[in-house]
Image (cartoon, rainbow, N blue to C red):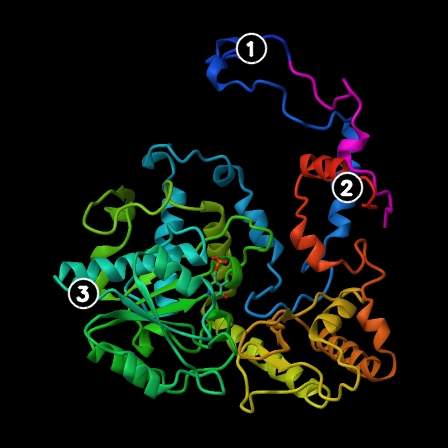
Amino acid sequence: MNTDATLIFEKSRSGRKAVSFSDYPYDGHRPFEELDQSLLREEPALLPEVSELDVLRHYTNMSQKNFGVENGFYPLGSCTMKYNPKINDEVQNFPAFKNAHPDQPASSVQGILKIYHELANHLSEISGMAETSLNPCAGAHGELTGLMIMKAYHEKNGDYKRTKVIVPDSAHGTNPASTSVAGMDVAEIESTDEGRVKLSSLKEALGDDIAGMMLTNPNTLGIFEKDICKITDMVHEAGGLMYYDGANLNAMLGKVRPGDMGFDILHLNLHKTFSTPHGGGGPGSGPVGVCEHLKEFLPSPRVRKHDGDYYLEETNAGIGRVTFHLGNVLVWIRAYAYVLTLGHENIKDIGPLATLNANYVRELLRDDYQLPISSYCMHECVFDGLKDNPHGVRTLDVAKRLIEQDMHAPTIYFPLLFKEAIMVEPTETESKETLDRFASLMKAIAKEAKDNPDVLKNAPQKTPVKRIDEVFAARKLILSYRDYLDYKKDDEALDF
Ligand SMILES: *Cc1c(COP(=O)(O)O)cnc(C)c1O
């Protein structure tokens, strides 16, 4: 790996460049002089001036400092970092998809609209819902869309006092956040020691001010809600709707359908379960499905089919628009390719394999790491720190040690229910050999915790960035070259 630590800005030399622009405006483009002066910068942007070769090396070296699914095992819990088949990237790269303009008339993008229509139908079938919209652009965005539908439904019934949404304390942080962005209040309920919904707390929370309940199943501990049908019945009897956070659908894909468990609204994360790489804030897609009696509330535009032609239906009947155009087209094109290449039969294997892998890891590590939950898990397993730990080695140290051995750390300190939580989601795309290697590294770390704890407390030492001072890094955020210059000016004495 290249160890040159010079920043691209430090490589900058005035006048050096990788491209040159003609002085003459070409067809249809206005020269800069014609732009409204108020739109122009007062001084040039602070950008590095470098050659093409500098740029190439900069990005290539950066990519090698990064860690992704393509570098090694990435068992980050609640994230589904599975391998995304390359063929799906190839498909979304077809020029007809990649170069389509969102304002093109529907008649010229019939193929894209057909994919929308068919994928939405496949997802409805997979999740057991009546109709699905692909418009929302992320999981949290899907949640917001779903909650707006929930609210619109109660308002249409004149039921304005239903303003509270029940969210278990083990829920993903986006659930309470979306509830509040949708203008509703969170009614948090306690979980059992095993992380399941406590039926007595649920019963207490139910009333005529409840709009509905948000639930992840399997929940964020990787545990299936055994009482799910009882839960959905209780909420329905109290007049509420059930919202399914389907970001974790990977565990159940092809086996169980949220619609059959009594859920009324759900979102899926195409960038977790359906073949779009994620992390780093790239484009996502969070389709929202609803049951029959909520179809009218879905966002606009909707893709419809008439006499073999596809068209966009703009309607004011539902909650209106939630995004630009139709959302992230290329993300759902990957999902479409993924669903079709797997087909009905193979999709059924995903959930069971993801579940088998997580339970395999759980069994391999149970002698060295504490298992706070006694029952089998679904797609992810949770440990609560080391079992035999005379030197007080923390979960953070375990994670740091792992990352210097070519494996990404699992999720740590989440869920909040356990103090030293380590959450492993191996996914179905990993082989037994990879899981065995992961387990042997984790076991070696458990041994180091007893014999040589300093190795863990100082890790990582072999990565491009070594153990950082987290408090300092959090207080002194340096996110741009300008921050860096300010920092150097303020604190000349400190070595960066
Ligand atoms: C990832 C995740 C979300 C949020 O999805 P984003 O696309 O990151 O907004 C919501 N709920 C659960 C359970 C998740 O795992």
Query: Which element type, helix, strand or loop, lies under badge 1?
Result: loop
Residue 442 spot, x, y in % from top left: 75, 78
For residue 266, above or below residue 51: below
Residue 42 spot, x, y in % from top left: 57, 18
- Number of residues whose C-alpha sits closer than 10 Å to that of mark 2, classed few (under 14), some (14–19) or many (20 or more): few
Q: Which of marks 1 and 2 is nearer the N terminus?
A: 1
Q: Is the magenta stretch mostly helix, strand or loop?
A: loop
Any magenta on residue 417?
A: no
Residue 161: which numbered mark, if any?
3
Image marks 1 and 2: residues in contact by CB distance under 8 Å: no
| Residue range of the region highlighted in magenta in the rendering | 1-21
Which residue matches tag 1? 25
- Amino acid of disc 2: Asp
Along the viewing direction, whichever of 193 and 445 lies nearer the viewer: 193
**Front label number (1 vs 3):** 3
For residue 475, above or below residue 193: above
- Number of residues whose C-alpha sits closer than 10 Å to that of mark 3, classed few (under 14), some (14–19) or many (20 or more): few
Q: Decide if residue 130 is in sight here.
A: yes
Report the residue at 48% width, 83% height from top.
195
Could you give the CA–CA distance between mark 1 and mark 3, rounded to whole angstroms?
60 Å
- Amino acid of disc 3: Lys
Which residue matches tag 2? 491
